[in-house]
Image (cartoon, rainbow, N blue to C red):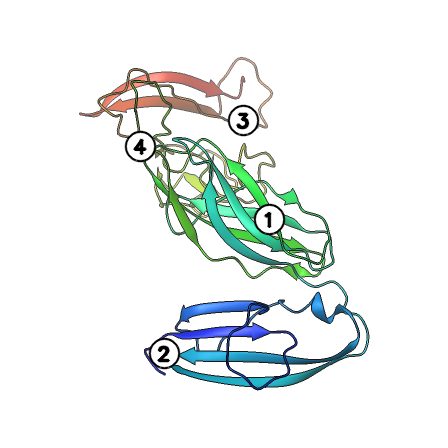
Amino acid sequence: MAGTTINYTFYCDRRDAGTDITPDSNAKFDTTFDNPKTAYNVCDSRYAVPGTYTAKVIAENGSTAAQDTAIITVNQPLGPSAPSVTTTGATSVTQASASLNMLVDPNGATTNIYFEFGPTTSMALTTNAAGVGSGNSSIPASISVTGLACNTTYYYRARASNSAGAAVPGSRLSFTTSPCGGGGGSQTVQLVNDPSFEAGPNAWWVATPAFYIDGRPIFPNPRTGNNYAFLSNPDGSRGNNLTGGMISPSVTIPSTATNVDLRFWYSITSDETTTSQVFDKLEVYLVRPGNQLTLITTLSNFE
């Protein structure tokens, strides 16, 4: 079967020797190149009751089908297990927002869900977590994301965890936000590709050695996500007499833009107690084509 696709159908308890596909299957994977194929956590709720079961899988390759079974004996109810998730299609997609959806089975333990997402397949952003209870059946769940760019493709996948462990990540899906403009109405477009530094150093931001990007616990309060940029030694460690550090992105402002709003968040900690001399200073510039510099503001240990 090398190089061809296979359809797999799993049953938690089917005792006949047939290869016909019936609607009571517990998991189904069509046109996959996986060989072998494993279905995770699909029978946990079924096997919660002691008894003897016949697990069955049917594999189809074109017009050829084969089946195999295994006897499963459950002597006592299974305890909680890691949740299982399936990524489903995004809904309520607008120019700047969308609802990300999944099916999740908590498998008997209190479970939290979240999504990885972003405008690249690395999906460097994460949503806040949401609780979905501790049931033993698959239920729909949704988390909304905002602040998206119009006419942009975003990738996302479902994630979940409970006291028994983390779910196998859901499949990666994508959606495209609504086209920019339309009807003459106004809109807000995020022009910074990675405003929370979640993609890590050198992914989009350009940083000189005295600036570092990661999520180490030097500052406990990144505004969103886990990462931030900070002044440091070249290896990211604290240092004294650091000079010349610079961090910058390249942003293209659409020709149709009528207003540009520059926002940034900062945190300054300093061992200096003086109120008369600047020791630690951050300058924010707007750099126009031709290297034209406009000083926006200066922040220091006086702040």
Determine if residue 207 is in view: no
Q: Earlier in the sequence, mark 4 or mark 1?
A: 1
- Determine whether 137 is above or below 21 in the image: above
* Mark 2 secondary-structure assignment: loop
Please give the residue where the numbered disc 2 appears in the rendered image.
62
- On residue 268, the disc is 3
Three-letter code for the amino acid on which mark 2 is drawn = Gly
Separation of disc 4 and disc 2 at Cα? 41 Å
- Determine whether 285 is above or below 206 in the image: above
Please give the residue where the numbered disc 1 appears in the rendered image.
140
**Residue closest to the far right:** 76
Please name whichever residue, 289 or 244, is drawn nearer the observer in this view of the structure. 289
**Residue closest to the far top:** 276
In the visual, does 171 lie left or right of 130?
left
Separation of disc 4 and disc 3 at Cα? 39 Å
Three-letter code for the amino acid on which mark 4 is drawn = Pro
Q: Earlier in the sequence, mark 1 or mark 2?
A: 2
Q: Earlier in the sequence, mark 4 or mark 2?
A: 2
* Mark 3 secondary-structure assignment: loop
- On residue 179, the disc is 4
In the visual, does 8 lie left or right of 43?
left
* Mark 4 secondary-structure assignment: loop
Separation of disc 3 and disc 1 at Cα? 43 Å
